Image: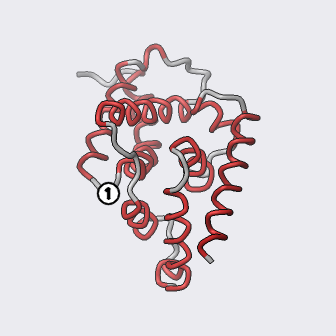
Amino acid sequence: MFFNKKNKRFSQYYNEFFEKIYNYIFFRVGNNRQMAEEFTQEVFLKAYENFDDFDKNANFSAWIYRIAHNHIIDHYRKKKTNTTDLDAIVNMINYSKHADETFVKNTDIKIEMKNVLKALESLNDQQKNLIILRYIEEYEIEEIAEIVKESANYVRVNLHRALQKLNSILTDFK
């Protein structure tokens, strides 16, 4: 197989987004690395197969996250199980390349983080997804709107409600 423009361009996107998509999937499917690897491969295969239909002027990030989001939803619709696992969230945060060493070592912060993660589990999937995309994946409101195929206002309002609910749950922990 020769390396044409499509392959080169897709390869650049793959290199840029592979780790981000893997982390997003890993976060959503629990601490099952094998499942996260398999899903990530399937997502990029779907993206490659449909790359000719991708609008080159569109946001690739929103497009690939949408594919990943739909892939996870399809899987759990078939399985009818929960999409996140508290241990996996803790694991991802503790071992993330972005985690600050002092942050991970600080016991008080770890306890607080476990409370936040427990509270996060009390949210519905939509609320968790918005919080993950905004505060863990660090996407802008407009990018999240593209990913979830809703308006930016919808994302702002629902993200605000999710944060209020999260705050309320955390207040109950104290």
Instruction: Look at 43% across and 30% down and name the residue there.
Output: 70
Pinpoint residue 107: horizontal percent, then vertical percent.
Answer: 49, 85
Q: Is residue 2 above or below residue 165?
A: above
- Quarter of the image with the C terminus in it: bottom right
Pinpoint residue 52: horizontal percent, then vertical percent.
Answer: 44, 15
Pinpoint residue 61: horizontal percent, then vertical percent.
Answer: 54, 35
Most foreground residue, 61 or 172: 172
Q: Secondary structure at mark 1?
A: loop
Q: Is residue 52 above or below residue 41?
A: above
Q: Quadrant of residue 44?
A: top left
- Quarter of the image with the N terminus in it: top left
Most foreground residue, 171 or 38: 171
Q: Is residue 54 above or below residue 14?
A: above
Most foreground residue, 145 or 43: 145
The residue most toward the top is 53
Instruction: Look at 41% across and 21% down and name the residue there.
Output: 6
- Looking at the image, residue 96 sits to the left or right of residue 159; the answer is left
Residue indicated by mark 1: 31
Q: What amino acid does circle 1 point to? A: Asn
Instruction: Look at 69% across and 42% down and name the residue there.
Output: 158
